[in-house]
Image (cartoon, rainbow, N blue to C red):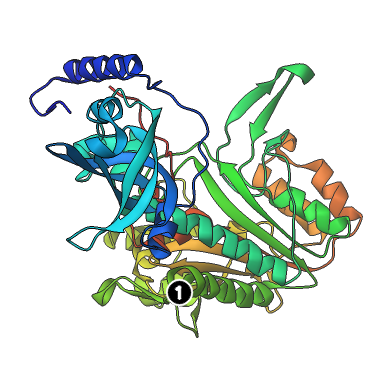
Amino acid sequence: MTDEIELTGDEIRAQRVANMKRLEALGYAPFGRAFERTGTLRGIRASFEEGKHVRLAGRIVSRREMGKSVFAHIQDATGRFQVYARKDGIGDQAFEAFQLLDLGDHIAVEGELFTTKMGEPSLKVTQWFLMAKALLPPPAKFHGLHDVEIRYRQRYLDLIANPDVCEVFRNRSRAVKAIRDFLYDRGYLEVETPMMQAMPGGAAATPFKTRYEALSTDVFLRIAPELYLKRLLVGGYDRIFELNRNFRNEGLSRFHNPEFTMLEIYEAYGNVRTMMALVCDMITHVAQAVYGRLVFGEGEEAIDLRSPWREAPYRDLVKERAGYDWFDLDTAGKRARAESLGCSVAPDWSDTDITQEVFEKLIEKTLRHPTFVTRLPVELVPLAKACEDDPESVDVFELIIGGREIAPGYTELNDPIEQRRRFEEQAAGDAVKIDEDFLAALEHGMPPAGGMGVGIDRLIMILSEVEAIRDVILFPQLKPKA
C-alpha cells in the first residue's frame, strides 16, 4: 500500500486508480456483487469458535504488512474484526493483489477462525474478493474526524470515522422503535396525514411554499399535522399517533432545523392530564429501555428523569422571575421591566408577547429537570380548551427538559363556534387564513380529547447528551458553501 501522507488529494486518487487497474489485471473486478456472510463481525466475535470456517465482509480500516503476510482489520456496521492473509495460504497472485488494497476498500473474505499469540480473535484467509474499491481515502486515517464542517456536510465520513456517532444514530432508531412499540401496546393506531397541504395550520410558523402543477395550485409543506389528525377523531378513531416530518421556513440554531421530526398523539375522551401521564411514562420507558438509565449528564447540568416531574403554572414562574406585581403592570410597565431584565421588546408587542419573551429568555432555560408548565395564556394556544376556572388561560402544558420545550400537550378545543372565533381573531380579518374545512369537521362533532406533540430530535439530544440538533439529524440543513 502506498504511503499517502505526503501526497496531494489528486495524487492519492491517481494512485488508487492505478491500484484499481492493477487489481483488475490480476483478476479482481473493482466493484463486486452480493456476498453471503456467515454473520456480522460483532456476531462472529460473540460466538467465536476456534477453527470454524466463516465468510465475512467489511471495509478495511487498518493494515500492516509483515513480509509474506498481512494483518488487517475490517469494519461493518457492528464492529471490527482482524483478518490475516499469508502468501502461502492464498497463493502468489491473490497475495500480490491483497497487497494492493487501500484503506477504505470493501472486501469479502473466507477462511478459518483462530486466535493470535496476542489473544486476538482473527480469521486466517483462504480466499478473498474485492467488493468495492475506494478511490478516495478515509478521513484522518480512521483516527477520528473532528472537522465540524466535514462532519455535517459529509456525514458518511463522520459515520466511518467516529463509532460514537454511529451509536447516536443507532440509539435514535431504537428510541423511535421503542416509542412505536410503547404506543402500540397501549392501543394507539399509527396513521399518516398529508405533508402537502392547501392551507398550513396547527401551529404558528412560516411555511415552505411550492407549486402542484397537475392541479395548477400552490401548496405548502406542513408545519404540523394537528388539524388532519383531529379530523380523524371526528371520523371515529379513538387513539392515534403520527411520527411525522414537519417543515418550518425559519432560522437555523442549536435547537432548530427547518425539517424536523415530531410525534403527535391524540386520545378521544382524554385531556391534558391523560397526556401528562402518557409522556412521562413514554420518555422514562424509552430512556430505560434504550439507554439503560434515567439520569443524563453530570453535575449541576445533569437531567434527572425520575418521577415525580414538577408542575408549575406559567403565571407563577413569570412572577417569580419578573416580580410578583408583573400582572398588575400596564403594557408600558411590563416593557420597562422586561428591558431592565435584559429582554429586547418590540414597540408593537402586546402584554402577552412581552410576557412570553420574559418566559422564553429568562425562565425556560433554567428548567433543567422535567417541568410541566401549565395554564398558558389563551392567546398563545388557540387550539386548546380554556381552563374551567379561568377563561384567560388554557388547559395545557409545555414540558420543558434541559431548558428547552420538548412537548406541548392540550385539552383539545372541540367547540366549533369558539374555534372559529379564535381563528378569526388570529387571522386579523384575513378570511383566507381560516381553515373552513377543519371547522366543518368540528361541526360534525369531535369528542373531547387530549393531544400532544413530542419533538423527537430534541428528546434524542437529551438522551444522547449532545448540545446541537445537527448531532442527531443525519443530514441537517446547512448554509451553502461560500
Tell me which amino acid carries mark 1.
Pro
In this view, the residue farthest toward the left is 6
Q: Quadrant of residue 407?
A: bottom right
Q: Position of residue 326 (x, y in %)?
A: 42, 71
Secondary structure at badge 1 equals loop
Rate crowding at label 1 as few (under 14), some (14 to 19) or many (20 or more) other CA atoms within 10 Å: many
Check disc 1 and report the residue beneath it.
Answer: 370
Number of labels in the image equals 1
Q: Position of residue 139 (x, y in %)?
A: 24, 36
Tell me the residue at 25%/19% (across/down): 19
Q: Is residue 25 left or right of residue 387?
A: left
Tell me the residue at 22%/45% (across/down): 144
Instruction: Using the image as rendered, state which of residue 250 and residue 92 is in the foreground.
Output: 92
Tell me the residue at 82%/42% (across/down): 436
Figure check: 35 above or below 213: below
Quadrant location, the C terminus: top left
Tell me the residue at 61%/28% (across/down): 209
Q: Tell me, yes or no, if residue 343 can be seen here.
A: no
Q: Position of residue 453 (x, y in %)?
A: 60, 59
